[in-house]
């Protein structure tokens, strides 16, 4: 069974169970209450009628006005025996309202019948055992018992009426329940469709992505389903970005591998054919092997940071000394490219806890990028200064090819290379800045790259917070 039908069935089942429970509880509770009501009606009416009869007896000093008391209480009686009544009188008697519902018998102090509202017992006769509720009739002046009144509710009549009422109540409740179930089915269909539609769309989109296609989900609401769609769309965008980066990685790694391998192959052939001296050939081969080793090193760094295995061997280090050594390490390459590389330090630099080897790698990646992107006759300068007591700021500024504003948000992405670096044949795997950011952030710092545009150079800035 599909999720949609299961949701709809669950909604209808809950509503149906609720309706049936309500009908059952309501029916039996009403039935039980009606029984209690019949008992209460008899007792309350007997008490009230006894008070009225006591008042009338006290006022007139006898039973002469008993008919008036019964009539005022709603128990009008007829002196014609039931067997002698005509059909018209019987109809009037039935329409009297309460004669057939309640029987009232008044017994005097001598134990003889005074009045029977149904005229079944003659006045002055000796009554048989009577049922119903009995109350004493008092002479209010002397507070003595002058008789009794029996009030007997016609249970058979009220039982018939109560069953009719219960049957009508049951019919109305079942009709309302059926309408409720019908509404629940309609709402269940709508709600299940609303819930399962995004799930179905998600399944189709996932299948499309599995087949290498691009897919997004429409965001139709701001609830959990809308949040799910937004999260899926973000995941899809991230996957598409990773696909593009993977394509770039394959192209870049293929290019990075192909160039040194081609050089090594040519040098080996030249050596074999006697076109190259061993010294020249070996020098070129070693140089290209170093390039391959550098690519492998970058990939190893990437794997290490991916698995969270980057561990720092911290030691208190002179930042000034570290920067001086790093600039000196890259001076030969800058001189070979006819680029001026300098270090400019403002004020006294602090000593910080750093992993010296990792920081050499990070700073080396930045300087290497700056040198590769700067043409002969250009300048690359490393600046270092304290930003008050808050941070140490290290920046590398070049006047090279610059970075387009559209590329700036992506420069720290792995394997990302700008179109300018590709078109100018600038070597690199696109991993340097990603590795550098990982190292800097592991030391608690931040790194940013800024550029005013193409041909305007670029600035990489590292900030290390100072402990207080």
Image (cartoon, rainbow, N blue to C red):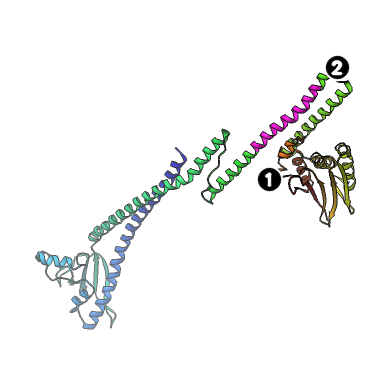
Image quarter in which the C terminus is found: bottom right
Q: What x and y, as percent, mark residue 20?
A: 37, 50
Residue span colored magenta: 242-266
Q: Are there few (<14), some (14-19), or many (20+) residues within 10 Å of tag 2? A: few
Residue 167 in view: yes
Splitting the image into 4 quarters, where does residue 265 fall? top right
Q: Earlier in the sequence, mark 1 or mark 2?
A: 2
Foreground residue among 110 and 369: 369
Q: What x and y, as percent, mark residue 226?
A: 54, 48
Question: Does residue 71 appear left or right of residue 214 in this picture?
Answer: left
Report the residue marked by disc 1: 406
Q: Disc 1 to disc 2, how far (Cα)?
A: 50 Å
Q: What x and y, as percent, mark residue 331?
A: 88, 39
Question: Does residue 157 appear left or right of residue 438 in this picture?
Answer: left
Foreground residue among 133 and 338: 338
- Say which residue appears at 28% left-offset and 70% top-offset: 45
Q: Please, is residue 382 above or below residue 26 in the view?
A: above
| Most common SS among magenta residues | helix
Foreground residue among 45 and 336: 336
Report the residue marked by disc 2: 274
């Amino acid at each position: 069974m599909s999720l949609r039908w299961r949701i709809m069935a669950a909604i209808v089942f809950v509503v149906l169970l609720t309706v049936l429970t309500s009908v059952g509880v309501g029916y039996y509770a009403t039935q039980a209450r009606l029984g209690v009501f019949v008992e209460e009606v008899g007792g309350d009416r007997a008490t009230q009628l006894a008070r009225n009869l006591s008042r009338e007896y006290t006022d007139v000093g006898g039973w002469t006005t008993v008919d008036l008391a019964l009539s005022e209480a709603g128990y009008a009686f007829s002196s014609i025996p039931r067997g002698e009544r005509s059909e018209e009188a019987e109809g009037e008697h039935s329409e009297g309202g309460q004669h057939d519902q309640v029987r009232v018998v008044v017994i005097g102090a001598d134990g003889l019948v005074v009045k029977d509202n149904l005229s079944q017992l003659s006045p002055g006769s000796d009554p048989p055992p009577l049922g119903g509720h009995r109350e004493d009739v008092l002479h209010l002046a002397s507070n003595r018992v002058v008789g009794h009144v029996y009030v007997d509710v016609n249970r058979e009549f009220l039982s018939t009426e109560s069953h009719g009422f219960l049957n009508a109540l049951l019919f109305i409740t079942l009709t309302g329940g059926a309408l409720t179930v019908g509404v629940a089915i309609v709402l269940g269909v709508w709600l299940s469709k609303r819930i399962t539609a995004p799930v179905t769309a998600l399944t189709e989109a996932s299948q499309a992505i599995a087949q290498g296609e691009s897919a997004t989900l429409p965001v139709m609401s701001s609830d959990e389903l809308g949040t799910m769609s937004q999260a899926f769309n973000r995941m899809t965008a991230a996957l598409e970005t990773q696909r593009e980066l993977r394509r770039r990685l394959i192209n870049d790694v293929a290019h990075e591998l192909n160039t040194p391998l081609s050089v090594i192959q040519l040098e080996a052939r030249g050596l074999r054919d006697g076109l190259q001296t061993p010294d020249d050939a070996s020098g070129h081969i070693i140089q290209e092997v170093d390039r391959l080793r550098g690519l492998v090193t970058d990939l190893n760094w990437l794997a290490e940071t991916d698995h969270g295995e980057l561990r720092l061997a911290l030691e208190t280090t002179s930042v000034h000394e570290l920067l001086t050594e790093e600039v000196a390490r890259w001076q030969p390459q800058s001189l070979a490219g006819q680029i001026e590389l300098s270090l400019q330090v403002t004020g006294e630099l602090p000593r910080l806890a750093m992993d010296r080897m990792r920081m050499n790698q990070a700073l080396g990646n930045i300087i290497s990028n700056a040198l590769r992107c700067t043409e002969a006759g250009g300048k690359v300068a490393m600046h270092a200064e304290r930003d008050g007591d808050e941070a140490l700021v290290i920046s590398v500024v070049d006047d090279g090819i610059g970075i387009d504003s559209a590329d700036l948000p992506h420069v720290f992405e792995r394997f990302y290379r700008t179109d300018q670096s590709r078109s100018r044949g600038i070597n690199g795997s696109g991993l340097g800045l990603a590795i550098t950011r990982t190292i800097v952030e592991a030391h608690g710092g931040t790194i940013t790259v800024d550029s005013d545009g193409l041909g305007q150079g670029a600035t990489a800035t590292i900030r290390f917070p100072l402990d207080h």
